[in-house]
Image (spheres, rainbow, N blue to C red):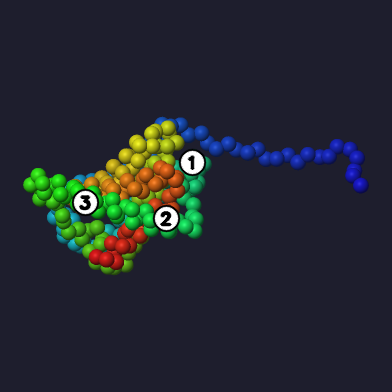
């Protein structure tokens, strides 16, 4: 039996709207995160480009290098977490979300990236030889791949996550949401990632841009980051176990 009379209404708590963030603030946040994450590696990479001996001699203290790496990664991620908290965003806003087939897509991306990069490598070094330029191929113990060790393995498994979250997911998403062309977002991502790999030598770094171009084009098309993280991880682990 229904009771007569007006029913009491339950007052719902007000829903707080997400904070509004101006484009200027988003550009500043993006610049701050990228500066913390990549200013030092870019400076070191360009120094090593003109001073090959810097990377041709083994690191004197691998543990200290690893501590520095993890400190830089951790600081950049903490700043990114603060930026996302302030903007009311989550990880899904930059394409992070796992699906069962992501590793398989990542494997396909890695194979495609390898084919394109190998083609670029032989093309660039062929042009160098045609013009009488001695290709700049150098041994690079400081990259962490010269010896198989726990330090190197940690380096090879943390860097793919760090790089792809910032250079691909965060940077490209900000360009998209701030109304910039897709081509500009791809270019910015590839140029940034290539810039801190020039210690390999300019020709080899340009060849590696093929990897970054494949990853950036896939993200622009799919807006999914996990397959790219897997692809980068598989790439680095392949180098680790085959050197």
Residue nearest the viewer, comparing 221 with 160? 221
Which residue does the numbered mark 2 point to in the structure image?
A: 105
Residue at the image position 28 percent from the left and 51 percent from the top: 116
| Residue 4 in sight | yes
Q: Is residue 53 above or below residue 181?
A: below
Q: Residues within 10 Å of mark 2 (few under 14, many from 20)?
A: some
Q: Nearer the viewer, mark 1 or mark 3?
A: 3
Could you tell me how far apart the alpha carbons at marks 3 and 2 are, in whole angstroms? 24 Å
Residue at the image position 34 percent from the left and 48 percent from the top: 214
Residue farthest toward the left in the current orientation of the protein: 132
Residue at the image position 26 percent from the left and 51 percent from the top: 117
Estimate the x, y position of residue 141 in percent, counting from the top left: 20, 61
Which residue does the numbered mark 1 point to in the structure image?
A: 86
> What is the secondary structure assignment of the residue under circle 1?
helix
Which residue does the numbered mark 3 point to in the structure image?
A: 121
Residue nearest the viewer, comparing 44 with 165? 165
């Amino acid at each position: 039996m229904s009771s007569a009379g007006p029913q009491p209404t339950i007052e719902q708590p007000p829903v707080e709207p997400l904070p509004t963030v101006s484009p200027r603030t988003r550009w500043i946040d993006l610049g701050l995160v990228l500066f913390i994450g990549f200013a030092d590696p870019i400076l070191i990479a360009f120094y090593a480009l003109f001073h090959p001996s810097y990377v041709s001699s083994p690191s004197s203290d691998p543990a200290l290098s690893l501590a520095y790496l993890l400190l830089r990664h951790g600081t950049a991620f903490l700043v990114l977490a603060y930026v996302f908290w302030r903007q009311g965003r989550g990880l899904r806003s930059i394409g992070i979300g796992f699906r069962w087939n992501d590793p398989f897509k990542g494997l396909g991306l890695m194979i495609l990236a390898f084919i394109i990069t190998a083609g670029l490598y032989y093309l660039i070094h062929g042009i160098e030889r045609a013009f009488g330029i001695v290709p700049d191929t150098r041994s690079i113990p400081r990259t962490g791949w010269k010896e198989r060790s726990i330090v190197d393995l940690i380096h090879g498994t943390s860097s793919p996550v760090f790089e792809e979250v910032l250079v691909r997911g965060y940077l490209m998403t900000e360009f998209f949401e701030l109304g910039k062309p897709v081509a500009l977002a791809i270019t910015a991502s590839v140029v940034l990632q290539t810039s801190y790999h020039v210690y390999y030598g300019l020709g080899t770094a340009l060849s590696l841009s093929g990897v970054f171009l494949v990853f950036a084009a896939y993200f622009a098309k799919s807006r999914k980051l996990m397959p790219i993280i897997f692809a980068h991880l598989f790439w680095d682990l392949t180098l680790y176990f085959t050197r």
